[in-house]
Image (cartoon, rainbow, N blue to C red):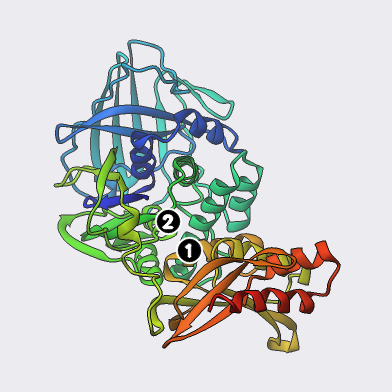
């Protein structure tokens, strides 16, 4: 059995996740096709190889035009003081398209006036014979900033092409709401699995941002998430995970830094509120390190919360493949996310034991999910029930209730394994109109059981044999009884009795 293990010793972010999964074997062509279908403009993507602490890593870079660029990787802006930058040398020996073209052998100079009282200078060396320098002057009391661009042309994905020639402009930061983001995902050409996962990640992030800002999921406007590069990162991560096709994901803990970081709202403590809300809501473990700076971004935390199914490594496993994804921020530890494909034996997975014993086993890790829904039809809820059972739910039921203002509604209840909670919530959020789900940890006693095939006068049927302190009971499987009843034109009750009688001969 294969599992993904995310080793977040240097934190986690959206671009690091995409890069590590590409390095692990996710199909780059599938990713590019999906991202090209997003109804967004003003960006390009670059996939390359970089060196981090002497290690060869994959780098996924969303290149924004001047209208959409932000300070996400600007260390002086984020921290308000100088940080040394890790070497970030791009190698383009393999064939890939950047959708990002430069006129070969040229220089361009940017002057940014932010009126925030500090200056900083960057040099980036690319193996495409061009140089660019940036000079920023910032004033913390002003959000307005201007840029002067000297003779450079960029071509970006999304059929968005523009030239800059000695002009000034103001940044237009896009603050999209949940509905706008969902519309983008609906229009994009994504697989069902990738789309559901992207919805799940955005929902987790939206709930965390809403709590931080004291508003609702419907009314929250994303700052970082609504930005083009964040949308691309989240969709890219969902596409790559879906492409790899491995459902079990182990994440033990997230290494986080400390201190303060600058954002549009000013200086915030690390972990930032959205990250703190996500780890609290989803039970993620944080390890606060001596690193001064943000290692876990809200996007990275939301991805981890959405995909984690296990929090402990198996006792025994083989490493099938390793992927290294590079981050952009330069701290005292290498900005690398390592993801591994692990292989475990069936014997170890079964070690917890489903063998028949004399007494019922107490099952830890059982969860009840509960939500009230007042704007879904019975047909919709019936479809949701089928989806939940197909995904492995132990039990699903819904009951009529009356909510505030005496509104008629349904309460949906799902019993499932703790490891399946994320999967169940994904179905509920995606297929219903609910915006919140309550979780209850349960302890469940479960009788040992085994499935057997019995021969009856109507044909073969499957039955479930359960044991309890020397006593055994037989339970005919519903689908088999229904099929035999149809074939032989008998009532369900008649058919059930025939199958049960045959099964009891085995006891």
The outermost residue toward the right is 489
170 left or right of 112 in image: right
Q: Is residue 453 above or below residue 413?
A: above
Residue 19 in percent (x, y) is at 35, 37
Residue 109: where, in percent of width, then height? Answer: 33, 24
- Residue placed at 74% from the left, 70% from the top? 376
Position in image of residue 124 (x %, y %): 26, 27
Can the viewer see residue 12 in this picture? no
Q: How many marks?
A: 2
Is 146 or 333 nearer to us in this picture? 333
197 versus 127 height, above or below: below
From the viewer's perspective, is 124 left or right of 202? left
Marks 1/2: CA distance?
A: 7 Å
Compared to residue 377, the image places residue 25 above or below, namely above
In the image shown, does 283 or 291 lie closer to the viewer? 283
Position of 131 with respect to 168 (left or right) is left
Q: Name the residue under label 1.
A: 422
Q: Is the Cβ of the residue at disc 1 closer than 8 Å to that at disc 2?
A: yes
Q: Residue 307 carries which label?
A: 2
**Label 2 crowd bin: few (<14), some (14–19), many (20+), radius 10 Å:** many
Q: What element carries label 1?
A: helix
Indicate whether 426 appears above or below 60.
below
| Element marked by disc 2 | helix
The part of the image, by quadrant, that contains residue 126 is: top left
At x 41%, y 17%, the residue is 102
* Residue 370 numbered mark, or none: none
**Quarter of the figure with residue 429:** bottom right
| Image quarter of residue 98 | top left
Q: Residue furthest top?
A: 105
């Amino acid at each position: 059995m294969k599992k993904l293990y995310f080793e977040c010793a240097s934190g986690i972010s959206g671009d690091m996740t995409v890069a590590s999964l590409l390095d692990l074997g996710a199909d780059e062509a599938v990713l590019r096709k999906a991202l090209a279908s997003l109804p967004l403009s003003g960006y390009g993507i670059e996939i390359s190889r970089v060196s981090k602490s002497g290690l060869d890593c994959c780098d996924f870079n969303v290149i924004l035009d001047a209208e959409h660029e932000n300070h996400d990787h600007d260390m002086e802006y984020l921290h308000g003081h100088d940080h040394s930058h890790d070497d970030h040398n791009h190698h383009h020996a393999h064939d890939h398209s950047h959708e990002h073209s430069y006129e070969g052998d040229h220089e361009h100079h940017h002057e940014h006036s932010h009126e925030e009282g500090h200056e900083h200078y960057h040099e980036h060396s690319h193996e495409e014979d061009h140089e660019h320098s940036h000079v920023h002057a910032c004033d913390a009391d002003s959000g307005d900033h201007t840029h002067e661009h000297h003779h450079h042309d960029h071509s970006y994905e999304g059929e968005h092409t523009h030239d800059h020639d000695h002009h000034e402009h103001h940044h237009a930061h896009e603050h999209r709401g949940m509905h706008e983001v969902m519309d983008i995902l609906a229009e994009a050409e994504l697989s069902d699995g990738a789309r559901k996962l992207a919805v799940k990640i955005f929902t987790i992030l939206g709930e965390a941002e809403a709590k931080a800002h004291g508003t609702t999921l419907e009314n929250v406007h994303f700052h970082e998430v609504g930005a083009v590069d964040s949308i691309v990162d989240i969709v890219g991560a969902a596409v790559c995970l879906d492409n790899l096709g491995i459902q079990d994901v182990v994440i033990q803990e997230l290494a986080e830094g400390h201190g303060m970081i600058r954002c549009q709202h000013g200086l915030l403590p690390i972990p930032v509120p959205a990250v703190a809300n996500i780890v609290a809501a989803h039970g993620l473990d944080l390890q606060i390190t001596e690193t001064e700076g943000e290692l876990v971004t809200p996007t990275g935390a939301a991805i981890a919360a959405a995909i984690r199914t296990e929090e402990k490594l198996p006792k025994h496993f083989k490493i099938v493949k390793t992927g290294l994804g590079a981050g952009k921020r330069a701290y005292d530890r290498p900005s690398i996310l390592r993801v591994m494909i692990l292989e475990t034996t069936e014997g170890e997975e079964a070690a917890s034991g489903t063998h028949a014993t004399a007494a019922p086993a107490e099952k830890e890790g059982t969860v009840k999910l509960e939500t009230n829904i007042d704007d879904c039809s019975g047909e919709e809820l019936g479809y949701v029930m089928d989806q939940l059972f197909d995904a492995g739910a132990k039990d699903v039921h819904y009951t009529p209730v009356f909510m505030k203002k005496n509104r008629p509604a349904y309460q949906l209840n799902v019993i499932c394994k703790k490891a399946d909670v994320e999967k169940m919530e994904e179905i509920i959020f995606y297929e219903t109109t609910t915006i919140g789900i309550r979780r209850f940890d349960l302890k469940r006693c479960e009788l040992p059981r085994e499935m057997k095939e019995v021969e009856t006068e109507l044909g073969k049927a499957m039955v479930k044999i359960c044991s309890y302190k020397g006593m055994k009971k037989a339970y005919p499987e519903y689908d088999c009884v229904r099929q035999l009843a149809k074939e032989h034109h008998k009532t369900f009750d008649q058919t059930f009795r025939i199958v049960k009688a045959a099964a009891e001969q085995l006891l």
